[in-house]
Image (cartoon, grey):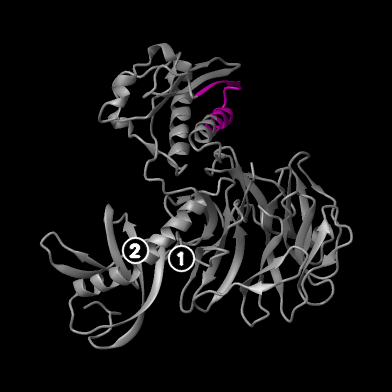
Amino acid sequence: MPHGIPPACERFRVQFRFRPCPAIGPQAKYLFFGTFRIKRTSKGEESIDRVNCVRTWEVKVKVFFSQFRVSSLLAFLLLATQGTFAQSEGWFRAGTGLGDANKPRLAIADFAPRADSAKSHSTLFTQLVRDDLQFSGILELASPSFYPPQAPSVPAELKPAVWIDPPTNANFLGFGNLTESTAEVAIEAWLYDVRSPSSQAVVGKVYRGAPTDVQVRKFAHQFADEVIGKLSGGLPGVASTQIAFVSSRSGSKEIWVMDYDGSNQRQLTTLKSISLTPRWSPDASRIAFTCFAPSAGLTSAQICMYSLDTGKLVSFPRFRGTNITPAWSPDGTQIIFSSSMQGNPELYVTDTSGGRPKRLTNANGASMSPSWNPKTGQTVAFVSDRGGTPQLYLMDSDGTSATKLDLPDKGYVIDPAWAPNGQLLAFSWRRPNDNYDIYVMDAASRQLVELTRDQGRNERPCWAADGRHLVFESTRGGTRQIWTMLADGSQPRQLTTSGHNESPNWSPK
């Protein structure tokens, strides 16, 4: 028996989790305890093997290992936890907008180049649209290997039947064409419901701009967002959004931004010191962040502001003490931050010009990392060690009614981030004898799911505007880098590779 499995008749505590395991097969579900799995072989034999899979739903139970077989344990657990798993799946997937069993199936035909000069950009446009749709989480993308040999480039060439039939089995078809000169690229793009071919195009767009990779990427993301918006009932796509983050690749920690898929990475600040915790304003015109730059006269950590419109720092008052972790109010008129201006690190709120800061907390311990509920504007989540270790707390936006969010285990809890719906709260939790991992909690019911596991340190989650994606930092590849994933923990994607990268924050639009 593998190391770590208790001997027979020993009473012990163990965590059980279910999740489809991509390492074995998308349809196979296994019972996990620790880093082991129980599986049945093709010959009906049972075995226990090590496995590293993301684990999502969890329940803690106490069991007695006696002389029963593994199958008896499995039967016991299924009986004891069936309702718990179903309930968890329901609230979590309803809260994220993921998990519809009847996802529309799309095919995206190769966009046709009208001349050899357009071939490169037609390939780029096609691939980006497919990537964006695949990562949307709300649809199923048919593999191009299943497509018929002839694809339309304009609506007059559309033959719906060949796209409906197996193996494509599409509900919708995206297609179009590109024309390119030395001065301009023109892209015609359509989405049709091939099962209702007599109807008008679901999406029909013409894009014109400079014939550059950056511009073609922008158009591809815009078209993908149009498709996602139509098929999700108006919920936004995020392919055209950006992610702000901190990178040390230039020799000091500076604020950078990149497209949501990791392309077009560019440096914003040049303070040549330490910049941390960037936070987009609700209108995406400014980024508030923590900065420490003695060369610029900042001898203690202060709140700094960067304008995307001017490409320059915006004046913001300097307060006494250490001032860190800014967060915007949902209407963009206020900023809440942690400051030691009166001695103990407490939370303060001020208008966006920094005038008349008002103290919100007064506790025997530090308070920091606030996150303002974007839906209600009435609740703030934050971290405080007033009880001895960093834990999550909720309070009203005026500082009253502070309450601790109790979790089912000990450890350090940091980095709260509200989902756009104002119901779910993502955070980082380092449980005893474990690494930091990303969790999501329903703030009302306190139900909990774990999104990362056994893959280094995973911290600082931030939601995309669609509530279906998260960005976070992780050391799973050895160095600290920026990753994204669907909000159920699937489809993790690494966005950065150069230098150390941390503190990601997803733009609201």
- Measure how far apart labels 2 and 1 are at the Cα level: 21 Å
Give the quarter of the image for residue 360: bottom right
| Residue 273 seen by the camera | no
Q: Which residues are magenta?
A: 203-222
Which residue corresponds to the image point at 76% horizontal and 73% vertical from the top-left? Answer: 345
Task: Indicate the position of residue 393 as horizontal and vertical percent values.
Answer: 65, 71
**First in residue order: circle 2 vs circle 1:** 2
Q: Nearer the viewer, residue 109 or 302?
A: 109
Q: Secondary structure at mark 2?
A: strand
Residue identifier under label 2: 18
Q: Nearer the viewer, residue 119 or 142?
A: 142
* Kind of residue indicated by mark 2: Phe
| Residue 465 seen by the camera | yes
**Residue 457, relative to residue 104: is it above or below?**
below
**Left or right of residue 84: residue 336:** right
Task: Indicate the position of residue 483 as horizontal and vertical percent values.
Answer: 51, 53
How many residues crowd around disc 2 within 10 Å: few (fewer than 14), some, or many (20 or more)? some
Which residue corresponds to the image point at 58% horizontal and 39% vertical from the top-left? Answer: 264
Residue 456 bears which disc, if any? Answer: 1
Quadrant where the image shows the N terminus: bottom left
* Kind of residue indicated by mark 1: Gly
How many residues crowd around disc 1 within 10 Å: few (fewer than 14), some, or many (20 or more)? some
